[in-house]
Image (cartoon, rainbow, N blue to C red):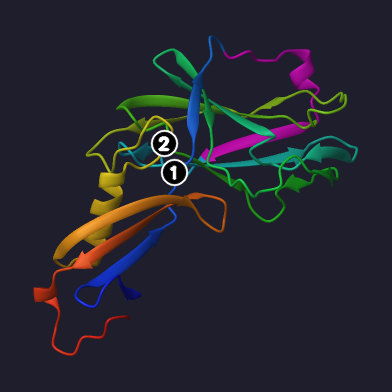
Amino acid sequence: MPLSKKNNRRPLLALAFSLLLLGGCAKLSALTKQRGDLAAKNPIEATLRLAQAQVRPGEAVIAYVWIKNIGSKSLSVQVVDASSVEFYANRSGEITHVRPVVSRKELLGTTVELPPGGILPASQARTFVLVTLSDRAGACALQAVYRPATKVGASALAPVYAKPVTFHVSGAPVCRRDRDGILVKADAIEIARRQVGRPVAAADASLHEDEMGLLCWTITLTIDPNDLKPGEPSSK
C-alpha cells in the first residue's frame, strides 16, 4: 500500500476507495404494469435474482438481470444495462423507482441481435448495484422491468416484467449514506482507519470521479509517528 509525504515530518497513507456511491430514488405514485394478452405474447423473458436475501443498513443490494428470447425469431433488442432496465421497490405499499449505480463513461442504449433461445448477457447475468434500498429496516419487494426497444423509434416489443423478489434489511448498520446513496465522509474515513489497523494522527477525504467514471473517496491518513518502526520505509 503506497505511502506518500506532504512534508518531511509525517508519513501519509493514501487510500483510494472505489466505493459504490452513486444511486438514487424517485417516488412514483404507482407502478403501471402491462400484463394480460400482450405480456403473454411477449417473446422475451426477463429474470431477476439477488445476491443476498438479507442485507444490513447501508449495505448495497446486488441484483442480477438477464433476458432470454423464448420466441421463434431473432430479435433486435437493447443490451441489458441501466438504460434498458428499470427497478421498482415496494416497501410497505410505498413504490419507489430506484436508479442503480452507473458509470458516466458507460455506453448505454446499444442494440444486439438475440437469436431464438439466446440469453443476454450471453456469458453471465448483468450485475446492478443499488445503494439506496437499505436505508431503513424491514422487507422490500424489488421488481426489474426490461425495455427491449430504444427510446428512439417504434417497436412492437412491450416492456418485460421480471418476477419480483423480496429481501430484508436488518442488523447493525454497515455505514451511513446520504439520500443519493453516497457514503458519508466520516464513515469513509472510519472504514479506511479500520483497514489500516494502525494509530492515526490525522485524516482527510476528498470525493472525485475515478478513471472508471464512478464517484470515489480518496482517504489520506497520517500515521502516528510513534507507531513507525525504526527503519520503516516511507512507502510500501
Q: Is residue 111 left or right of residue 162?
A: right
Q: Secondary structure at mark 1?
A: loop
Q: Position of residue 185 (x, y in %)?
A: 30, 45
What residue did someone put label 2 on?
181
Give the residue displayed 71% in from the left and 47% down from the top. Answer: 107
Q: Residue 101: give x, y in percent of width and height.
A: 53, 41
The residue closer to the viewer here, 95 or 193, is 193
Check residue 40 for magenta coloring: yes
Q: Residue furthest top?
A: 29
The image shows residue 13, relative to residue 24, as above or below, that is below
Q: Quadrant of residue 200?
A: bottom left
The residues colored magenta run 31-49
Q: Is residue 21 left or right of residue 143?
A: left
Q: Residue furthest left?
A: 226
Of the residues shown, which amino acid type is indicated by label 1?
Leu
**Do callouts 1 and 2 mark residues in contact (Cβ within 8 Å)?**
yes
Q: Residue at x 52, y 49 (%)?
A: 214
| Residue at image coords 21%, 86% | 232
Q: Quadrant of residue 236?
A: bottom left
**Which type of secondary structure does the marked residue at label 2 adopt?**
loop
Type of residue at label 2? Gly
Left or right: 42 in relation to 51: right
CA distance separating discs 1 and 2 = 6 Å
* 7 relative to 126, above or below: below
- Residue 21: assigned label: 1
Crowding near pointer 1: few (<14 within 10 Å), some, many (20+)? many
How many neighbours does mark 2 have within 10 angstroms: few (below 14), some (14-19), or many (20 or more)? many
Depth order, front residue of 108/203:
203
Residue 225: which disc?
none
User: Relative to 112, does residue 96 appear above or below in the rendering?
Assistant: above
Question: Residue 192's image quarter?
Answer: bottom left
Quadrant of the image for the N terminus?
bottom left
